Amino acid sequence: TSNGIPHKMGEPERVRVVAYQNHLDRTPLPHGANRNDLFISGCKVSQPTGSGSGSEDRDFTFDAAFGPETVPVSVVRSEVPLAVDAFLDGINAVLLVLGASGSGKDELLAGTPATGGAERWEGLVEHLIRSMYAALRESGEGGVASGAARLQLQFLHIDSERVQDLLEPDCHSHNLQLADDDEAGTLVREARPEVLKGEAHAISLYRRGVQSVHTLGRYHAVDVDAACSILTLTLTRRSATEAGPTGADGELAASYYSSTLSVVGLPGTERLRTRSREHETREAQYEMHIAEGAFKHRSITQFGELTKALARRGQRTQHVPWRGGKLVRLVGERLGGNARVQAIATLKGGQRDESRATLKCAAELRRVVQYPLVNTTVLSSGCTHSPFLSPERPPTACSTPFRSTRPCSLRPQPSGLQVTRIWPACGMSNGLTAGGTLAPRLELG
Protein backbone atom coordinates (compact mmCIF):
# COMPACT_ATOMS: atom_id res chain seq x y z
CA THR A 1 0.00 0.00 0.00
CA SER A 2 0.90 3.68 -0.32
CA ASN A 3 -0.38 5.88 2.51
CA GLY A 4 -2.82 3.08 3.25
CA ILE A 5 -4.29 3.13 -0.27
CA PRO A 6 -4.49 -0.34 -1.87
CA HIS A 7 -2.35 -0.99 -4.95
CA LYS A 8 -5.08 -3.16 -6.42
CA MET A 9 -8.37 -1.33 -6.62
CA GLY A 10 -11.54 -0.78 -8.57
CA GLU A 11 -12.91 2.59 -9.52
CA PRO A 12 -12.75 4.85 -6.43
CA GLU A 13 -16.02 6.00 -4.93
CA ARG A 14 -16.95 7.64 -1.67
CA VAL A 15 -19.15 6.17 1.01
CA ARG A 16 -22.76 7.19 0.41
CA VAL A 17 -24.25 8.73 3.57
CA VAL A 18 -27.83 9.88 4.16
CA ALA A 19 -29.31 11.52 7.25
CA TYR A 20 -32.79 10.77 8.57
CA GLN A 21 -34.55 12.73 11.30
CA ASN A 22 -37.41 10.57 12.51
CA HIS A 23 -39.97 9.91 15.22
CA LEU A 24 -39.57 6.14 15.34
CA ASP A 25 -38.37 6.14 18.95
CA ARG A 26 -41.26 7.40 21.08
CA THR A 27 -39.29 7.79 24.32
CA PRO A 28 -40.16 11.18 25.89
CA LEU A 29 -37.45 13.82 25.68
CA PRO A 30 -35.96 15.40 28.81
CA HIS A 31 -37.74 18.46 30.17
CA GLY A 32 -36.65 21.60 28.37
CA ALA A 33 -35.20 19.84 25.33
CA ASN A 34 -35.59 21.82 22.11
CA ARG A 35 -37.35 19.64 19.58
CA ASN A 36 -36.50 22.09 16.80
CA ASP A 37 -32.72 22.00 17.07
CA LEU A 38 -32.25 20.45 13.61
CA PHE A 39 -32.98 22.00 10.23
CA ILE A 40 -32.96 20.03 6.98
CA SER A 41 -32.79 21.72 3.60
CA GLY A 42 -32.06 19.62 0.55
CA CYS A 43 -29.01 17.52 1.40
CA LYS A 44 -27.91 19.76 4.27
CA VAL A 45 -28.50 19.27 8.00
CA SER A 46 -27.92 22.29 10.25
CA GLN A 47 -27.87 22.97 13.95
CA PRO A 48 -28.53 26.52 15.17
CA THR A 49 -25.65 28.55 16.60
CA GLY A 50 -24.82 27.57 20.13
CA SER A 51 -26.20 24.05 19.96
CA GLY A 52 -23.91 21.11 20.51
CA SER A 53 -20.43 21.32 21.96
CA GLY A 54 -19.48 24.44 19.99
CA SER A 55 -20.68 26.70 17.21
CA GLU A 56 -18.28 25.72 14.42
CA ASP A 57 -19.05 23.29 11.61
CA ARG A 58 -22.76 23.28 12.37
CA ASP A 59 -23.71 22.62 8.73
CA PHE A 60 -23.32 19.09 7.39
CA THR A 61 -23.89 18.06 3.79
CA PHE A 62 -24.73 14.47 2.85
CA ASP A 63 -25.82 12.60 -0.26
CA ALA A 64 -29.44 12.90 0.88
CA ALA A 65 -31.31 14.11 3.94
CA PHE A 66 -34.82 13.19 5.04
CA GLY A 67 -36.94 15.18 7.47
CA PRO A 68 -39.34 13.91 10.14
CA GLU A 69 -42.25 13.99 7.70
CA THR A 70 -40.63 11.17 5.70
CA VAL A 71 -41.90 7.66 6.41
CA PRO A 72 -39.14 5.08 6.97
CA VAL A 73 -40.08 2.97 3.95
CA SER A 74 -39.23 5.92 1.68
CA VAL A 75 -35.74 6.15 3.15
CA VAL A 76 -35.19 2.42 2.89
CA ARG A 77 -36.44 2.26 -0.70
CA SER A 78 -33.88 4.88 -1.69
CA GLU A 79 -30.93 3.00 -0.16
CA VAL A 80 -31.60 -0.74 -0.11
CA PRO A 81 -31.75 -1.25 -3.91
CA LEU A 82 -28.22 0.16 -4.27
CA ALA A 83 -26.84 -2.41 -1.83
CA VAL A 84 -28.89 -5.30 -3.23
CA ASP A 85 -27.89 -4.56 -6.84
CA ALA A 86 -24.20 -4.47 -5.93
CA PHE A 87 -24.55 -7.69 -3.93
CA LEU A 88 -26.19 -9.56 -6.82
CA ASP A 89 -23.54 -8.28 -9.23
CA GLY A 90 -20.75 -9.89 -7.20
CA ILE A 91 -19.68 -6.75 -5.32
CA ASN A 92 -19.33 -6.72 -1.54
CA ALA A 93 -21.84 -4.31 0.03
CA VAL A 94 -22.07 -2.84 3.51
CA LEU A 95 -24.99 -0.87 4.95
CA LEU A 96 -24.17 0.92 8.20
CA VAL A 97 -26.87 2.33 10.48
CA LEU A 98 -25.51 4.76 13.06
CA GLY A 99 -27.13 7.07 15.54
CA ALA A 100 -27.44 7.88 19.20
CA SER A 101 -29.46 5.74 21.56
CA GLY A 102 -33.11 6.74 21.24
CA SER A 103 -32.64 8.26 17.77
CA GLY A 104 -34.73 5.59 16.04
CA LYS A 105 -31.74 3.52 14.93
CA ASP A 106 -33.00 0.23 16.35
CA GLU A 107 -36.55 0.86 15.17
CA LEU A 108 -35.35 1.62 11.64
CA LEU A 109 -33.51 -1.70 11.56
CA ALA A 110 -35.98 -4.03 13.27
CA GLY A 111 -39.30 -2.27 12.68
CA THR A 112 -42.13 -1.00 14.85
CA PRO A 113 -45.59 -2.40 15.64
CA ALA A 114 -48.81 -0.73 14.56
CA THR A 115 -49.64 1.61 17.45
CA GLY A 116 -51.40 4.93 17.85
CA GLY A 117 -52.82 4.89 14.36
CA ALA A 118 -49.39 4.39 12.81
CA GLU A 119 -48.94 1.48 10.43
CA ARG A 120 -46.61 -1.38 11.22
CA TRP A 121 -43.07 -0.88 9.90
CA GLU A 122 -41.37 -4.16 9.01
CA GLY A 123 -37.85 -2.81 9.39
CA LEU A 124 -34.91 -2.28 7.06
CA VAL A 125 -33.54 -5.82 7.32
CA GLU A 126 -36.79 -7.59 6.46
CA HIS A 127 -37.36 -5.14 3.61
CA LEU A 128 -33.85 -5.89 2.32
CA ILE A 129 -34.40 -9.65 2.46
CA ARG A 130 -37.69 -9.38 0.57
CA SER A 131 -36.11 -7.08 -2.02
CA MET A 132 -33.19 -9.45 -2.51
CA TYR A 133 -35.40 -12.49 -3.10
CA ALA A 134 -37.67 -10.49 -5.41
CA ALA A 135 -34.63 -9.53 -7.48
CA LEU A 136 -33.48 -13.15 -7.57
CA ARG A 137 -36.89 -14.32 -8.74
CA GLU A 138 -36.94 -11.73 -11.50
CA SER A 139 -33.37 -12.37 -12.59
CA GLY A 140 -32.72 -14.68 -15.51
CA GLU A 141 -28.95 -14.21 -15.37
CA GLY A 142 -26.13 -15.83 -13.51
CA GLY A 143 -27.77 -19.25 -13.40
CA VAL A 144 -30.18 -18.14 -10.69
CA ALA A 145 -33.13 -19.31 -12.75
CA SER A 146 -31.56 -22.76 -12.93
CA GLY A 147 -30.73 -22.82 -9.24
CA ALA A 148 -26.95 -22.38 -9.49
CA ALA A 149 -26.77 -20.17 -6.42
CA ARG A 150 -26.26 -20.50 -2.71
CA LEU A 151 -27.23 -18.03 0.02
CA GLN A 152 -26.00 -18.08 3.61
CA LEU A 153 -26.88 -15.91 6.60
CA GLN A 154 -24.95 -15.11 9.75
CA PHE A 155 -26.06 -12.87 12.63
CA LEU A 156 -23.41 -11.74 15.11
CA HIS A 157 -23.62 -9.56 18.22
CA ILE A 158 -20.73 -7.75 19.92
CA ASP A 159 -21.11 -6.73 23.56
CA SER A 160 -18.14 -5.56 25.64
CA GLU A 161 -15.76 -7.17 23.12
CA ARG A 162 -17.61 -10.50 23.36
CA VAL A 163 -18.72 -11.89 20.00
CA GLN A 164 -21.95 -13.90 20.14
CA ASP A 165 -23.77 -15.92 17.48
CA LEU A 166 -27.40 -14.84 17.78
CA LEU A 167 -28.64 -17.87 15.87
CA GLU A 168 -27.45 -20.23 18.61
CA PRO A 169 -29.70 -20.85 21.65
CA ASP A 170 -26.88 -20.41 24.19
CA CYS A 171 -25.47 -17.21 22.70
CA HIS A 172 -25.49 -15.48 26.12
CA SER A 173 -22.50 -17.62 27.11
CA HIS A 174 -20.56 -17.01 23.90
CA ASN A 175 -17.18 -15.35 23.75
CA LEU A 176 -16.21 -16.36 20.22
CA GLN A 177 -12.63 -15.64 19.27
CA LEU A 178 -11.30 -14.14 16.06
CA ALA A 179 -8.60 -15.68 13.90
CA ASP A 180 -6.56 -14.28 11.02
CA ASP A 181 -6.10 -16.18 7.79
CA ASP A 182 -3.75 -15.10 5.00
CA GLU A 183 -6.39 -15.75 2.36
CA ALA A 184 -9.72 -15.44 4.14
CA GLY A 185 -8.91 -12.47 6.37
CA THR A 186 -10.47 -12.17 9.83
CA LEU A 187 -12.55 -15.20 10.82
CA VAL A 188 -14.93 -15.83 13.71
CA ARG A 189 -14.21 -19.15 15.34
CA GLU A 190 -17.16 -21.55 15.70
CA ALA A 191 -19.68 -19.18 14.11
CA ARG A 192 -21.94 -21.23 11.85
CA PRO A 193 -23.61 -19.46 8.92
CA GLU A 194 -27.01 -20.89 8.03
CA VAL A 195 -27.73 -22.04 4.46
CA LEU A 196 -30.96 -20.31 3.46
CA LYS A 197 -33.89 -22.31 2.09
CA GLY A 198 -35.96 -19.33 1.02
CA GLU A 199 -37.32 -15.91 1.91
CA ALA A 200 -39.44 -17.11 4.82
CA HIS A 201 -36.49 -19.02 6.27
CA ALA A 202 -34.25 -15.94 6.09
CA ILE A 203 -36.81 -13.72 7.82
CA SER A 204 -37.44 -16.31 10.55
CA LEU A 205 -33.70 -16.53 11.25
CA TYR A 206 -33.45 -12.76 11.51
CA ARG A 207 -36.42 -12.57 13.88
CA ARG A 208 -34.87 -15.30 16.01
CA GLY A 209 -31.70 -13.21 16.27
CA VAL A 210 -33.64 -10.08 17.22
CA GLN A 211 -35.44 -12.03 19.94
CA SER A 212 -32.05 -13.20 21.21
CA VAL A 213 -30.95 -9.57 21.52
CA HIS A 214 -34.06 -8.77 23.58
CA THR A 215 -33.33 -11.78 25.80
CA LEU A 216 -29.73 -10.66 26.31
CA GLY A 217 -30.87 -7.22 27.38
CA ARG A 218 -33.67 -8.41 29.65
CA TYR A 219 -32.17 -11.42 31.38
CA HIS A 220 -28.40 -11.14 30.97
CA ALA A 221 -27.76 -7.47 31.79
CA VAL A 222 -26.47 -6.63 28.30
CA ASP A 223 -26.48 -2.92 27.47
CA VAL A 224 -27.96 -3.19 23.99
CA ASP A 225 -27.32 0.52 23.33
CA ALA A 226 -23.57 -0.06 23.70
CA ALA A 227 -23.63 -3.29 21.67
CA CYS A 228 -23.68 -3.74 17.91
CA SER A 229 -25.14 -6.29 15.51
CA ILE A 230 -23.75 -7.56 12.21
CA LEU A 231 -26.02 -9.47 9.84
CA THR A 232 -24.17 -10.86 6.82
CA LEU A 233 -25.61 -12.49 3.71
CA THR A 234 -23.24 -14.43 1.46
CA LEU A 235 -24.17 -15.21 -2.14
CA THR A 236 -22.34 -17.56 -4.51
CA ARG A 237 -23.85 -17.72 -8.00
CA ARG A 238 -22.81 -18.86 -11.45
CA SER A 239 -21.88 -16.01 -13.77
CA ALA A 240 -23.97 -15.20 -16.82
CA THR A 241 -21.40 -16.69 -19.22
CA GLU A 242 -21.54 -20.44 -19.78
CA ALA A 243 -17.78 -20.69 -20.26
CA GLY A 244 -15.35 -18.60 -18.29
CA PRO A 245 -11.63 -18.14 -18.84
CA THR A 246 -9.50 -21.15 -19.67
CA GLY A 247 -7.85 -23.09 -16.91
CA ALA A 248 -4.21 -23.98 -16.49
CA ASP A 249 -4.40 -26.76 -19.12
CA GLY A 250 -6.41 -24.78 -21.64
CA GLU A 251 -9.78 -26.36 -20.81
CA LEU A 252 -12.93 -24.31 -20.39
CA ALA A 253 -13.66 -23.00 -16.92
CA ALA A 254 -16.83 -22.11 -15.05
CA SER A 255 -17.05 -18.67 -13.47
CA TYR A 256 -18.82 -17.80 -10.21
CA TYR A 257 -19.58 -14.62 -8.35
CA SER A 258 -19.16 -14.57 -4.59
CA SER A 259 -20.15 -11.52 -2.57
CA THR A 260 -21.30 -10.49 0.88
CA LEU A 261 -23.89 -7.99 2.06
CA SER A 262 -23.54 -6.83 5.66
CA VAL A 263 -26.05 -4.76 7.62
CA VAL A 264 -24.32 -3.28 10.65
CA GLY A 265 -26.18 -1.66 13.53
CA LEU A 266 -23.50 0.41 15.25
CA PRO A 267 -23.51 1.20 18.99
CA GLY A 268 -24.90 4.52 20.18
CA THR A 269 -22.81 7.41 18.88
CA GLU A 270 -23.46 9.50 21.99
CA ARG A 271 -20.23 8.00 23.32
CA LEU A 272 -18.32 10.09 20.78
CA ARG A 273 -17.55 13.65 21.79
CA THR A 274 -15.80 16.35 19.83
CA ARG A 275 -13.38 19.12 20.60
CA SER A 276 -11.85 21.59 18.16
CA ARG A 277 -8.16 22.28 17.60
CA GLU A 278 -6.26 24.43 15.13
CA HIS A 279 -4.16 22.69 12.48
CA GLU A 280 -1.35 23.93 10.24
CA THR A 281 -3.89 24.65 7.51
CA ARG A 282 -5.64 27.11 9.87
CA GLU A 283 -8.86 25.23 9.33
CA ALA A 284 -10.91 24.31 12.36
CA GLN A 285 -11.14 20.53 12.43
CA TYR A 286 -12.56 18.22 15.02
CA GLU A 287 -10.86 15.37 16.73
CA MET A 288 -12.92 12.51 18.12
CA HIS A 289 -11.91 11.36 21.54
CA ILE A 290 -13.20 8.93 24.08
CA ALA A 291 -15.64 10.48 26.52
CA GLU A 292 -15.87 7.28 28.53
CA GLY A 293 -13.05 4.79 28.75
CA ALA A 294 -15.36 1.95 29.73
CA PHE A 295 -14.54 -1.37 28.10
CA LYS A 296 -18.06 -1.80 26.77
CA HIS A 297 -17.84 1.37 24.64
CA ARG A 298 -14.67 0.32 22.84
CA SER A 299 -16.55 -0.73 19.70
CA ILE A 300 -17.96 2.69 18.81
CA THR A 301 -14.97 4.74 19.96
CA GLN A 302 -12.49 2.68 17.96
CA PHE A 303 -14.84 2.73 14.97
CA GLY A 304 -14.79 6.53 15.20
CA GLU A 305 -11.00 6.54 15.28
CA LEU A 306 -10.82 4.24 12.25
CA THR A 307 -13.29 6.39 10.31
CA LYS A 308 -11.32 9.55 11.06
CA ALA A 309 -8.04 7.95 9.95
CA LEU A 310 -9.54 6.63 6.71
CA ALA A 311 -11.15 10.00 5.94
CA ARG A 312 -7.69 11.59 6.05
CA ARG A 313 -5.88 8.78 4.26
CA GLY A 314 -3.72 10.00 1.41
CA GLN A 315 -3.45 13.55 2.75
CA ARG A 316 -0.41 12.60 4.76
CA THR A 317 1.22 9.53 6.20
CA GLN A 318 -1.13 8.42 8.95
CA HIS A 319 -1.54 5.24 10.89
CA VAL A 320 -4.81 3.44 10.16
CA PRO A 321 -5.90 1.49 13.27
CA TRP A 322 -7.00 -1.74 11.57
CA ARG A 323 -6.05 -3.83 14.61
CA GLY A 324 -8.53 -2.43 17.08
CA GLY A 325 -11.39 -4.14 18.87
CA LYS A 326 -13.67 -6.86 17.55
CA LEU A 327 -15.93 -4.51 15.58
CA VAL A 328 -12.99 -2.76 13.90
CA ARG A 329 -11.37 -6.05 12.96
CA LEU A 330 -14.56 -7.40 11.38
CA VAL A 331 -16.18 -4.38 9.78
CA GLY A 332 -13.02 -2.32 9.33
CA GLU A 333 -11.79 -4.67 6.61
CA ARG A 334 -14.57 -3.38 4.40
CA LEU A 335 -14.00 0.31 5.02
CA GLY A 336 -11.58 1.85 2.57
CA GLY A 337 -11.30 -1.36 0.57
CA ASN A 338 -13.17 -3.80 -1.64
CA ALA A 339 -16.79 -2.96 -0.84
CA ARG A 340 -19.57 -0.55 -1.71
CA VAL A 341 -20.45 1.13 1.57
CA GLN A 342 -23.58 3.09 2.47
CA ALA A 343 -24.61 4.62 5.78
CA ILE A 344 -27.86 5.90 7.27
CA ALA A 345 -27.45 8.35 10.16
CA THR A 346 -30.55 8.54 12.37
CA LEU A 347 -31.33 11.80 14.18
CA LYS A 348 -33.95 12.92 16.66
CA GLY A 349 -34.92 16.45 17.54
CA GLY A 350 -34.10 17.35 21.14
CA GLN A 351 -30.92 15.26 21.30
CA ARG A 352 -28.58 18.21 20.84
CA ASP A 353 -25.14 16.85 21.68
CA GLU A 354 -26.01 13.32 20.60
CA SER A 355 -27.11 14.51 17.16
CA ARG A 356 -23.94 16.53 16.80
CA ALA A 357 -21.77 13.49 17.55
CA THR A 358 -23.71 11.48 14.97
CA LEU A 359 -23.39 14.20 12.34
CA LYS A 360 -19.65 14.49 12.93
CA CYS A 361 -19.11 10.74 12.59
CA ALA A 362 -21.32 10.58 9.48
CA ALA A 363 -19.47 13.49 7.87
CA GLU A 364 -16.13 11.77 8.44
CA LEU A 365 -17.53 8.54 7.03
CA ARG A 366 -18.62 10.29 3.84
CA ARG A 367 -14.99 11.24 3.15
CA VAL A 368 -13.82 7.61 3.12
CA VAL A 369 -12.96 6.34 -0.37
CA GLN A 370 -13.89 2.79 -1.39
CA TYR A 371 -12.53 0.60 -4.20
CA PRO A 372 -15.24 -2.00 -4.94
CA LEU A 373 -14.41 -4.94 -7.20
CA VAL A 374 -16.42 -7.71 -8.82
CA ASN A 375 -15.38 -10.88 -6.99
CA THR A 376 -15.09 -13.80 -9.41
CA THR A 377 -14.04 -17.39 -8.79
CA VAL A 378 -12.99 -19.49 -11.80
CA LEU A 379 -13.00 -23.31 -11.77
CA SER A 380 -11.55 -25.41 -14.58
CA SER A 381 -13.89 -27.94 -16.19
CA GLY A 382 -12.08 -30.88 -14.63
CA CYS A 383 -12.22 -29.54 -11.11
CA THR A 384 -14.06 -31.86 -8.74
CA HIS A 385 -14.81 -29.13 -6.21
CA SER A 386 -17.69 -26.71 -6.14
CA PRO A 387 -18.06 -23.13 -4.90
CA PHE A 388 -21.19 -24.26 -3.07
CA LEU A 389 -20.82 -25.61 0.43
CA SER A 390 -22.90 -28.72 0.94
CA PRO A 391 -25.57 -28.22 3.64
CA GLU A 392 -24.72 -31.67 4.98
CA ARG A 393 -21.06 -30.75 5.37
CA PRO A 394 -20.42 -29.06 8.74
CA PRO A 395 -18.41 -25.82 8.61
CA THR A 396 -14.82 -25.72 9.73
CA ALA A 397 -13.73 -24.40 13.10
CA CYS A 398 -13.21 -20.95 11.60
CA SER A 399 -16.28 -20.84 9.38
CA THR A 400 -17.73 -17.39 8.76
CA PRO A 401 -19.08 -15.33 5.85
CA PHE A 402 -16.54 -12.63 6.70
CA ARG A 403 -13.69 -12.72 4.21
CA SER A 404 -10.87 -10.37 3.43
CA THR A 405 -12.06 -7.37 1.46
CA ARG A 406 -8.88 -5.33 1.48
CA PRO A 407 -7.54 -5.80 -2.05
CA CYS A 408 -4.03 -4.70 -1.09
CA SER A 409 -3.21 -8.30 -0.13
CA LEU A 410 -3.96 -9.57 -3.66
CA ARG A 411 -1.79 -9.43 -6.75
CA PRO A 412 -2.34 -6.44 -9.05
CA GLN A 413 -4.47 -6.97 -12.16
CA PRO A 414 -4.27 -4.80 -15.27
CA SER A 415 -8.02 -4.37 -15.58
CA GLY A 416 -8.51 -3.24 -11.99
CA LEU A 417 -12.17 -4.21 -12.28
CA GLN A 418 -12.50 -7.64 -10.77
CA VAL A 419 -10.80 -10.13 -8.50
CA THR A 420 -10.37 -13.46 -10.28
CA ARG A 421 -8.97 -16.68 -8.86
CA ILE A 422 -8.39 -19.75 -11.11
CA TRP A 423 -8.19 -23.20 -9.56
CA PRO A 424 -7.05 -26.11 -11.80
CA ALA A 425 -8.57 -29.57 -12.01
CA CYS A 426 -6.08 -30.99 -9.52
CA GLY A 427 -7.95 -29.36 -6.67
CA MET A 428 -8.17 -26.13 -4.71
CA SER A 429 -6.28 -24.67 -1.84
CA ASN A 430 -7.63 -23.21 1.37
CA GLY A 431 -9.75 -20.49 -0.19
CA LEU A 432 -13.31 -19.46 -0.91
CA THR A 433 -14.46 -22.99 -1.58
CA ALA A 434 -13.46 -25.79 0.69
CA GLY A 435 -14.78 -28.92 -0.96
CA GLY A 436 -18.30 -30.27 -0.79
CA THR A 437 -20.65 -31.38 -3.53
CA LEU A 438 -22.71 -29.38 -5.96
CA ALA A 439 -25.56 -27.80 -4.07
CA PRO A 440 -29.20 -28.46 -4.93
CA ARG A 441 -31.29 -25.77 -6.50
CA LEU A 442 -31.83 -22.63 -4.50
CA GLU A 443 -35.31 -22.54 -3.02
CA LEU A 444 -36.58 -19.01 -3.47
CA GLY A 445 -39.63 -19.49 -1.30
Image: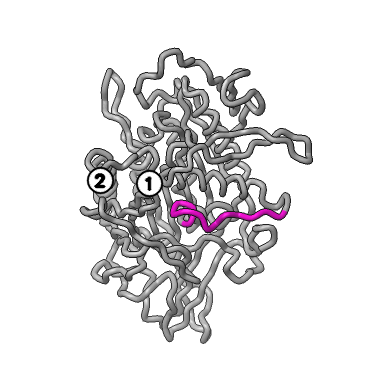
At 47% across and 24% down in the image, what residue appears? 351
In depth, the one of 438 and 100 nearer the eye is: 100
Quadrant where the N terminus is found in the figure:
bottom right
Residue 241, can we see it?
A: yes
Query: Main SS type for the magenta part?
Result: loop
Q: Residues within 10 Å of mark 2 (few under 14, many from 20)?
A: many
Magenta-drawn stretch contains 185: no
Tell me which residue sits at (58%, 69%) in the image: 410
Mark seen at residue 212: 2
Q: Position of residue 308 (x, y in %)?
A: 60, 45
Q: Is residue 440 above or below residue 99?
A: below
**Camera-side residue of 198 and 372:** 372
In the picture shown, does residue 24 fall above or below 132?
above
| Residue that numbered label 1 is attached to | 229
Which residues make up the magenta segment? 317-329
| Discs 2, 1 touching: Cβ within 8 Å | no
Q: Quadrant of residue 97?
A: top left
- Position of 97 with respect to 45 (left or right) is left
Dot 1 amino acid type: Ser
